[in-house]
Amino acid sequence: MPDVIKGEDMDAAIKKRLPGLFLLSFSTYIVCVPAAFTQIISFDLMLDLNSFPGNDYAWTFPAFVAGECASMGLCASTLDRYGRKIPYLIGSLLFIASSAACALSTEMMPFILFRGVEGFGAGIIIVTCIAQIFFDVENPKLRYMANGIMSLGFGGGMLTGIFAGRAVMGVIDWPVAFWIFAILQALVMYPSLEILSNGRKSTLKVNPPAAIIITVWAGLFVFFLQKMYLDWSIADPMAQMCLGLLVMLFLAFLLIEVHDPESMFHRKVKNAKLTAASLIFIVLLGVIDMGAVGFMVKIAFFTYQMSVMEAAPFFIILVCGAAVTAICISKMIDRTGHLVWLLLSAVLSPIALLSMVFVTEDDPSFLYALHLFVLGLAIGCLVSMLNATIQNRTNEDNNGAMMSFAIMVRTLSLWLGYNFYQLMADLYMKERIGATVDHWNSIMPVQLPSDSSIANLLVTPLNDFIRAIPGLTDEIATFFAEGVGVGFTYGAIAFVVVAVPVALLLVRGEKEI
């Protein structure tokens, strides 16, 4: 590993790589935009794809996430052996073709299938671009900045997807948006492939059974959570069978990895304690902090009834908060080590989440902006630092595997956190408005949901109709925010309980960047 460089040499080194890094970051941005896009246009999809009044539309987002996580699992076993160019090319072709197929869809079920393929291609692109940092940026300190640039594409794309879904309603048809996604990725594909030519392939063989199992496991995990949310309870036999299958698949994966001497399990990392701590914090980051961001966007749209132009500045503030701590870490990590930033995240995350309790619909602007800025600071403490920390402890035989696994864990954790906050909002809303909605459902010819799904309808043409129902009016939006606030409170407590002991036990005294 090269010695850490400083001053002008460091500036020159990172500036040389900036164009390529930003191009790869832009590619991850493009493929992340469609992820949550369908959450906001669900009403349009239900009508245009002949799905109304069913709930098939609820699978459009998880199908993408399932495909995304499955491909990340596959890359965890194959990326080092096959390099970066071939996986990126395959991912791009899958993403482009499936995005076009989504645009041409006329029925919901084919659309959901194409969304799964779209997510599969997106997942390959994301982990390939992030893993390329290992070869393009050899200096360990500069990798903290490089991962920050790459994280900007991932996080910015997710946020833009939600805003884009809100913006296209009434402006352009949603199929046009999917054509735009396909065209943009097609345009960046060739120059990105040129950048990805830098690097070396591992000579160690792939473990096909392990690759297949972790791919199936990751996709099934997303499926299980969505079925639990929509149809199952933990007492249902099907839920128990699916949970048992998840456990057996993961144990089989571990057994195969341990048995094969050339598997990723045996490709050792430097400082396993710090790597393990980073993976634990990645879970906390995904479940608690990143899961919260999506619901803050929903609160902006549902509770405060903001337009895209009104809400965008608030989330630019969030990104700025993340940039502040990420840049500070990239400049100071060699002097501070990791512990101070992990402990800072254990302070900032609970403050950001608990501050939500004090945000009201009557005065959202100042407190809402402050809340998002602090949440951004907390996310910035972790998102790029954890990636770079793991990357700096790998070698040519396992760098792609470890980064793919870490990003898969983060994405699965984000999905788990998203479902947790949604569950908290659902339970709270059913308690507060369930009886009223059930009463009107017994009278009206249409059936309204009594959980957080009714809040989604507040950004559709049904908004005025729902708010006119006696006993509901503005309570829906308020109760949605309060329910999410309950979830944030539990998340804040969990973050402190887990983060502080892990940081002190596994990271204390660690200075190597």
Image (tube, rainbow, N blue to C red):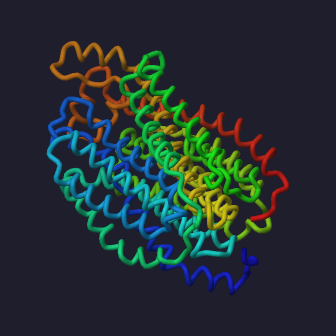
Q: Is residue 325 visible?
A: no
The N terminus - image quarter: bottom right
What residue appears at the point 53 percent right and 69 percent down from the top-left corner? 132
The quadrant where residue 399 appears: bottom right
What residue appears at the point 58 percent right and 52 percent down from the top-left corner? 406
**Residue 418 placement (x, y as % from top left):** 47, 39
Q: Viewed as shown, does residue 50 lie left or right of 18? A: left
The quadrant where residue 327 appears: bottom right
**Residue 212 placement (x, y as % from top left):** 46, 46
Q: How many marks?
A: 0
Q: Viewed as shown, does residue 198 lie left or right of 118? A: right
Q: Residue furthest right?
A: 509
Please say if 476 is above or below 120. above
Please say if 66 is above or below 339. above
**Residue 457 placement (x, y as % from top left):** 28, 35
Residue nearest the observer in this picture, 451 or 261: 261
Residue nearest the observer in this picture, 431 or 474: 431
